[in-house]
Image (cartoon, rainbow, N blue to C red):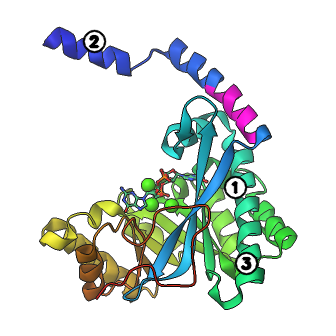
């Protein structure tokens, strides 16, 4: 059994040469993917409780690999961060998402989502000129700054002063700042004093067990308290059941996101409430 375990560990931990070779292969493939349009964006509704009306969407990237089919971002975003390709990929995501949001605004009017969220990785945030690039993209696409939120993780913000300066620049310009996966990083609460945060995205791990009144509900309740106390907007992530949605609403959450309300899709429907939480 020990030998089998060792074998498995080896299989799942390629040595550095293998890792480098795999990264090079992935890099070449992603380069082609970017240039030939194999990447596309999907949008997941962020809804207002209790009705479940879509008020915003989060942008998530997908890769239609010619042989492997759909590849999720968890498999290639970390690589793009290591290789630096995320800078170009991220700029493409931002431009495409802002153009899409502006198209919704012009075609759907009052039914359009009020805001679009775009994930920004640590590497992008510390790239010189990042804030200027975002502001230029808004100008090019015509999307008002207040219609855009950038989602950053606590880890990203922890990369230091340059990241925090970029967030202040964006915030001054009217772009909303969302702290993603909130509660899973380190020094979560301390960050709220140095970073101009508007939105706290409460991680799915605190939502998962919420309907069974355990430790998770204690934390979820504490986080809505912090959020309300500081005048921030809390969004509960990863809501999969009506019970969770109802419990979150009772706790004071007014915004939620998750498969229960809608999966990420290329063409979300905005006109009608998807589901209702009682
Ligand atoms: P995230 O920003 O925390 O995004 C939420 C992830 O949870 C998405 O996975 C979404 O599809 C999934 N999700 C939403 N609701 C539910 C639910 O009810 N249950 C479950 N089990 N999952 C749910 P996805 O699309 O695979 O993205 C994974 C991560 O990849 C994202 O986590 C984000 O960190 C990163 N990512 C995705 N797109 C981009 C991008 O354009 N740029 C950057 N830098 N990162 C991205
Ligand atoms: Ca996110
Ligand atoms: Ca998240
Ligand atoms: Ca996450």
- Going from N to C along the chain, the mark reached first, 3 or 2, is 2
**Real-space Cα distance between discs 1 and 3?**
16 Å
Up-down: is 91 above or below 139?
above
User: Label 2 near label 3: C-beta < 8 Å?
Assistant: no
Q: Please name the residue that numbered disc 2 is placed on.
A: 7
Residue 1 coordinates in the image, percent (x, y): 12, 13
The residue at the point 35 percent across, 58 percent down is: 184
Counting residues from the start of the chain, the first of labels 1 and 3 encountered is 1
- State the CA–CA distance, disc 1 to disc 2: 39 Å
Position of 69 compared to 36: left or right?
A: left
| Magenta portion: prevailing SS class | helix
SS under mark 1 = helix
- Secondary structure under badge 3? helix
Please state the horizontal and vertical placement of residue 33, each as a whole percent of the image.
71, 37
Name the residue that disc number 3 marks.
145
Q: Residues within 10 Å of mark 1 (few under 14, many from 20)?
A: many
Closer-to-camera residue (72/237): 72
Whether residue 128 is situated above or below residue 216 in the rendered picture: above
Q: Which mark is residue 93?
A: 1
Disc number lying in front (1 or 3): 1
* Region in magenta: 26-34
Q: Please tell me whether residue 250 is drawn above or below residue 260 in the rendered image.
A: below
The reply to whether residue 131 is visible in this rendering is: yes
Q: Please determine whether, in this image, residue 201 is positioned above or below residue 16.
A: below
Quick one: 276 or 118, which is closer to the camera? 276
Checking the image for residue 22, the label placed there is: none
Residue drawn 36% across and 69% down?
260
Q: CA distance from mark 3 to mark 2?
A: 52 Å
Query: Which of the two discs, 1 and 2, labels the residue nearer the N terminus?
Result: 2
Q: Quadrant of residue 172?
A: bottom right
Q: Residue at x 25, y 63 (%)?
A: 208
């Amino acid at each position: 059994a020990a030998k089998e375990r060792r074998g498995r560990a080896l299989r799942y931990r390629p040595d550095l040469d293998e890792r480098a070779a795999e990264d090079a292969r992935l890099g070449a493939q992603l380069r082609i993917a970017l240039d030939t349009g194999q990447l596309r964006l999907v949008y997941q509704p962020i809804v207002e409780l209790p009705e479940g009306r879509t008020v915003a969407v989060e942008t998530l990237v997908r890769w239609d690999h010619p042989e492997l089919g759909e590849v999720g971002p968890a498999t290639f975003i970390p690589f793009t961060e290591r290789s630096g390709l995320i800078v170009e990929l991220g700029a493409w995501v931002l431009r495409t998402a802002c153009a899409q949001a502006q198209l919704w605004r012009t075609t759907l009017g009052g039914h359009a989502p009020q805001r679009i969220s775009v994930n920004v990785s640590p590497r992008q945030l510390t790239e010189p000129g990042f804030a200027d690039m975002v502001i230029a993209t808004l100008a090019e696409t015509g999307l008002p700054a207040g219609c855009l939120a950038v989602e950053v993780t606590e880890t990203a913000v922890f990369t230091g002063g340059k990241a925090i300066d970029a967030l202040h620049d964006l915030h001054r310009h009217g772009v909303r700042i969302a702290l993603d996966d909130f509660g899973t990083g380190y020094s979560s609460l301390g960050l709220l004093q140095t970073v101009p945060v508007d939105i706290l995205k409460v991680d799915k791990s605190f939502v998962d067990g919420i309907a069974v009144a355990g430790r998770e509900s204690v934390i979820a309740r504490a986080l809505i308290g912090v959020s309300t106390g500081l005048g921030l907007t809390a969004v509960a992530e990863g809501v999969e059941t009506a019970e969770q949605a109802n419990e979150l609403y009772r706790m004071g959450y007014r915004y939620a996101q998750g498969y229960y309300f809608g999966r990420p899709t290329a063409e979300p429907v905005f006109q009608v409430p998807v589901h209702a939480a009682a």
